[in-house]
């Protein structure tokens, strides 16, 4: 009975967590249409503000351990970069600035990892990565030039440019 | 053989505790404890001069003495101040063993249960890592309980005095006082004397401080609500954190007020339902569980109150409580104060997103365990005793339960609001 209760509570929390990103997005920094026209496709379903986000990261680490082929590993690293980018866009656009610093660091760290180990594959993803800078610039322009958030986004843009 | 196992366990615990004490740093509550003791040594009134709430006078004197010893022996304060709670933990272990033997428990099981205390991660974390002094009043409560209800020759007034000393170190045993009074097999005059004797230590030790500005000091003491770091407050903080990495909840004053009322009404229900219960130990345990489960301002060290009482009553719920409590504590320190937990080994920063999940899940499981345990104790008692209640008492018990449940409604409403708001973008 006790275990059932715990399981029920955990499942309820997971449901609440998952439902968050399906809510209407009325108070975003940039309207959805504008982001789409800049080349942004969709958000991640689990974003850094959610309690279950560390579970997603743990799962990613487990998957990467099981990838032995170098090419597959590199491909997976670029998939992870795409995830970090989508999470960053979510955090900026939904004005969850409390999470911005950590999210930018996570994105930059993934970029750094690729620059150090898998830069040769970057040409395969050139247009996609160029698009990242375009979308991030669109979001950055909504902050004034003295804003700390603007600087953090600039760091992300600069790091992205180093990859391509 | 049983004492050999006990001493081996104690030795092991001492090694673990010394390791943590030696690698701890001067952070968190240690600084606050130093401030209290230092104020007295400088001739200041800690109840006026400090920006935070000071503990009752005997605790302040203990810290003053620690500062003097620290200067004389040239041992850092943050090491020396942890000596007292750890010493109290050691005495609790030996007393638990002795009391369990007197209760005719097999010596092997008595040493096993005593080791559940001294090797308990909650006890080690609170006394050796956090450096909180809650095990000193817990030791006094244990002695007082034994003298009052478990001993073959009860010594009520000594029990009252020891309970009073506990109150003069930390105020939490005050919530047990009504239950000591109603469950003692004494007449009204003796109960009144018990009450007076138990209030002597706090009154006498407060007089030198309170005489300076009674109104301000009393108001400050009574208005203190605690910090909402654990139990359901922590669950709500976990939800609220998702909004925008906010670590403090909104409308906390309302939560404090509503939870105070709910706890008082819950205590009244327990007072009526458990009146003349033969097991004062379980009664005290249920009061502490009610506090942990219902009150909003639960701090880390409050978890340690449960341990000696649960072990002396040999309640197996101590196992899930210890597991979930340890998870909650690890999550709490990792997120809010990693320098407290990791001491000299810590080099990073606090408030890292990934630890919030441990804090949240640990507290969720802890709170479920507490509520489950509380309901279980009450249900066990009601199942056996409800039939022999008079009609009048039955009605009063039901009425007090209904009032208690009604008092929970605003809390549920506010908690629900926080959850709903935290899941909206």
Image: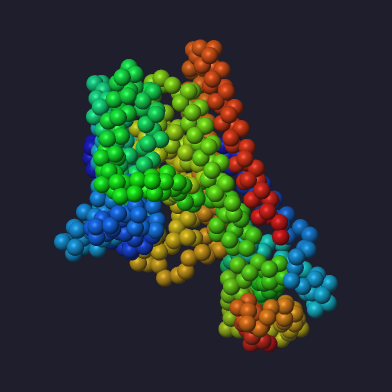
Quarter of the image for residue B80 reads bottom left
Image vertical order of residue B235 relative to residue B113, above or below: below
* Quadrant (top left/top right/bottom left/bottom right) for the C terminus of chain B: bottom right
With B107 as the anchor, is B343 left or right in this view? Answer: right
Mark count:
0
Q: Can residue B316 be seen in this view?
A: no
Provide residue B405's location: percent of width, then percent of height: 59, 32
Relative vertical location of residue B215 with respect to residue B197 in this rendering, above or below: below
Is B16 rendered above or below residue A106? Answer: above
Residue plotted at (39% across, 28% down): B179
**Residue B239 screen position, x and y as percent:** 61, 54
Lateral position of residue B356 relative to residue B300, left or right:
right
Residue A119, image quadrant: bottom right
Image quadrant for the N terminus of chain B? Answer: top left
**x and y percent of residue B260 in the render?**
51, 40
Q: Residue furthest left?
A: B72
Q: Would you say residue B386 is visible in this rendering?
A: yes
**Colouring used for the render:** rainbow
Q: In which quarter of the image is residue A98?
A: bottom right
At 38% across and 23% down in the image, what residue appears? B182
Instruction: In the rendered view, tell whether residue B282 sits above or below residue B327.
Output: above
Foreground residue among A78 and B147: B147
Residue located 43% across and 62% down the image: B338
Residue A15 drawn at (x, y percent) = 70, 50
In percent of the image, x 59 and y 58: which residue is there?
B241
């Amino acid at each position: 009975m006790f275990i059932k209760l715990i399981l029920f509570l955990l499942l309820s929390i997971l449901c609440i967590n998952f439902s968050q990103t399906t809510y209407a997005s009325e108070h975003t920094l940039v309207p959805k249409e504008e982001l789409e026209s800049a080349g942004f496709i969709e958000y991640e379903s689990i974003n850094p503000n959610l309690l279950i986000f560390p579970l997603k990261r743990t799962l990613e680490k487990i998957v990467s351990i099981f990838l032995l082929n170098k090419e597959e590993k590199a491909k997976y690293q670029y998939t992870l970069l795409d995830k970090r980018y989508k999470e960053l866009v979510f955090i900026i656009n939904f004005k969850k600035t409390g999470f911005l610093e950590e999210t930018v660091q996570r994105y930059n760290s993934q970029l750094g990892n690729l620059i150090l180990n898998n830069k040769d594959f970057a040409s395969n993803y050139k247009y996609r990565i160029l698009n990242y800078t375009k979308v991030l610039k669109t979001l950055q322009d909504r902050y004034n030039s003295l804003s700390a958030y603007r600087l953090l986004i600039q760091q992300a843009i600069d790091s992205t440019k180093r990859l391509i | 053989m049983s004492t050999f196992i006990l001493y081996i366990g104690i030795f092991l615990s001492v090694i673990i505790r010394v390791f943590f004490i030696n690698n701890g740093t001067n952070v968190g509550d240690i600084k606050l404890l130093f401030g209290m003791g230092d104020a007295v040594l400088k001739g200041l009134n800690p109840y006026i001069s400090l920006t935070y709430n000071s503990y009752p006078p005997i605790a302040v004197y203990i810290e003053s003495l620690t500062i003097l010893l620290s200067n004389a022996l040239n041992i850092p304060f943050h090491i020396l101040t942890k000596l007292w709670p750890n010493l109290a933990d050691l005495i609790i272990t030996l007393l638990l063993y002795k009391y369990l033997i007197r209760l005719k428990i097999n010596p092997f099981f008595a040493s096993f249960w005593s080791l559940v205390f001294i090797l308990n991660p909650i006890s080690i974390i609170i006394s050796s890592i956090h450096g909180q002094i809650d095990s000193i009043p817990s030791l006094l409560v244990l002695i007082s309980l034994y003298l009052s209800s478990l001993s073959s020759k009860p010594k009520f007034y000594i029990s009252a005095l020891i309970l009073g000393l506990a109150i003069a170190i930390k105020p939490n045993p005050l919530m047990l006082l009504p239950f000591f009074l109603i469950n003692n097999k004494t007449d009204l005059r003796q109960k009144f004397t018990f009450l007076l004797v138990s209030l002597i230590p706090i009154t006498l030790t407060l007089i030198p401080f309170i005489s300076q500005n009674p109104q301000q000091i009393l108001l400050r003491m009574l208005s203190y609500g605690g910090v909402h770091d654990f139990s359901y407050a922590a669950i709500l903080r976990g939800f609220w954190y998702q909004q925008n990495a906010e670590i403090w909840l909104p409308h906390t004053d309302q939560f404090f007020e509503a939870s105070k009322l709910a706890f008082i009404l819950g205590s009244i229900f327990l007072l009526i339902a458990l009146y003349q219960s033969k097991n004062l130990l379980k009664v005290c345990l249920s009061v502490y569980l009610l506090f942990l489960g219902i009150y909003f301002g639960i701090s880390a060290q409050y978890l340690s109150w449960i341990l000696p009482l649960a072990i002396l009553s040999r309640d197996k719920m101590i196992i899930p409580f210890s597991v979930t409590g340890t998870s909650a504590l690890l999550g709490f320190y990792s997120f809010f104060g990693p320098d407290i937990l990791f001491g000299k080994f810590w080099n990073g920063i606090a408030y890292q997103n990934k630890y919030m999940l441990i804090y949240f899940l640990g507290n969720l499981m802890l709170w479920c365990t507490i509520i489950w345990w509380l309901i279980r104790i009450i249900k066990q008692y009601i199942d056996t005793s409800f039939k022999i209640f008079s009609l009048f008492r039955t009605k009063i018990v039901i009425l007090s339960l209904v009032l208690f449940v009604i008092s929970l409604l605003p809390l549920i409403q506010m908690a629900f609001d926080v959850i709903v708001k935290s899941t909206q973008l």
